[in-house]
Image: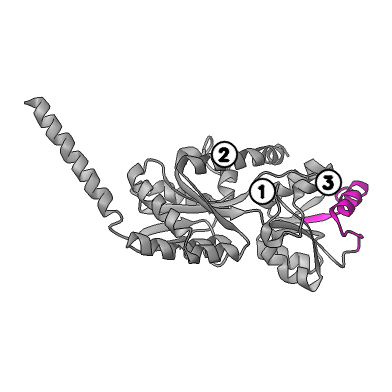
């Protein structure tokens, strides 16, 4: 009799769980992003949220929660219920939360998040110098020669501790040069400083420099990556110039650890459909990115591989 009752209870639990999955989502799904309105993270997630709303049949809303280099938003997600109604959308900088110790001691993103999918990204960050620079730099070879003769004389616009700071460290290490990394904050602030001649080197999205390339004001030296970006294939990649760089920029979706795998699978399937729809593809194209859908463990492996590229740079920074 007890065995029979146990079987009945088990069957009922299966039915309840199946019904819950079939009904998900029953209300709005909130995507939290650690970014202000208007940037690439905000633009791309709002585009895909439109399609996810259509696919899931419930509103998918975006909440901007900038601050603490992403830690504010991450902590908010950690404090929510693992019920599938709070989603985290971020990019490479999640890896730096761990590598640079910006969360609690011992914190790891793999322990905090269940990864739904990597959605898009690509190699689109270029290194620029101004055409009217006073140091005779027109090529990477010129830059390396000048930097070796004049250590720390060249200034490189970064946000200290950010992804582009990691790129600068990697470049210096690979090419055996020293430049002065100047903390200028956000991308817009760095661009203004470079335009005004306050710094010598700018790393930025190709799209942010495209107007000035066409006008002849900016010289693109290379795109960070091991392959050229086909949207501007005339610009060499760093690997061709003796500076291999295997980390690709990416955006991903994650849930609080412990979210029902079947709910995650339903959301991930919606993402798979949404990345192939016009809103997300058009938003990615604004920044010369492309769809790069890698669900579940494939996404985790991809992120871990990128993290290993950044690890030595972070260790260098933490050791200073």
236 relative to 35 in the view: left or right: right
List x then y, in percent, for residue 258. Answer: 37, 40
> Looking at the rendering, in which quadrant would you find the C terminus?
top right
For mark 3, what is the residue? 178
Q: Which mark is residue 304?
A: 2
Q: Which residue is drawn at 12% across and 35% down?
A: 8
310 relative to 63 in the view: left or right: right
Which class describes the residues within 10 Å of circle 2: few (<14), some (14-19), or many (20+)? some
Q: Residue at x 48, y 59 (%)?
A: 276
| Residue 97 visible in the shown view | yes
Q: Which of marks 2 and 3 is in front?
A: 2
At numbered mark 2, what does the secondary structure look like: helix, strand or loop? Answer: helix
Q: Residue at x 71, y 48 (%)?
A: 167
Q: Nearer the viewer, mark 3 or mark 1?
A: 3
Q: Which residue is drawn at 72% across and 66% down?
A: 209
Cα–Cα span, label 2 and label 3: 28 Å
For mark 1, what is the residue? 161
Sequence-wise first label, 2 or 3 = 3
- Which region of the structure is painted magenta? 134-156
């Amino acid at each position: 009799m007890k065995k029979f009752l146990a079987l009945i209870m088990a069957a009922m639990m299966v039915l309840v769980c199946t019904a819950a999955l079939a009904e998900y989502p029953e209300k709005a799904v909130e995507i939290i992003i650690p970014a202000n309105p208007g940037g690439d993270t905000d633009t791309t997630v709002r585009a895909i949220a439109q399609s996810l709303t259509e696919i899931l049949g419930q509103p998918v809303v975006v909440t901007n929660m900038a601050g603490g280099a992403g830690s504010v938003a991450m902590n908010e997600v950690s404090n929510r219920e693992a019920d599938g109604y709070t989603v985290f959308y971020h990019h490479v900088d999640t890896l730096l939360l761990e590598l640079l110790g910006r969360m609690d001691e011992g914190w790891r993103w793999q322990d905090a998040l269940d990864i739904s999918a990597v959605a898009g990204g690509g190699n689109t960050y270029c290194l620029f110098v101004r055409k009217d620079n006073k140091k005779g730099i027109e090529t990477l070879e010129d830059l390396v020669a000048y930097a070796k003769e004049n250590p720390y004389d060249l200034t490189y616009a970064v946000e200290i501790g950010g992804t582009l700071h990691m790129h600068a460290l990697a470049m210096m290490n690979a090419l055996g040069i020293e430049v002065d990394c100047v903390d200028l904050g956000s991308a817009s602030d760095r661009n203004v400083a470079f335009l005004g001649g306050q710094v010598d080197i700018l790393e930025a999205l190709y799209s942010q420099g495209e107007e000035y390339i066409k006008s002849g004001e900016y010289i693109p030296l290379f795109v960070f990556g091991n392959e050229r970006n086909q949207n501007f294939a005339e610009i060499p990649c760093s690997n061709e110039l003796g500076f291999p760089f295997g980390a690709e920029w990416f955006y991903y979706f994650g849930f609080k650890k412990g979210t029902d795998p079947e709910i995650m699978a339903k959301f991930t399937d919606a993402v798979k459909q949404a990345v192939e729809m016009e809103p997300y593809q058009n938003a990615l194209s604004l920044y010369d990115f492309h769809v790069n859908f890698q669900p579940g463990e494939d996404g985790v492996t991809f992120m871990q591989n990128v993290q290993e590229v950044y690890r030595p740079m972070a260790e260098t920074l933490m050791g200073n």
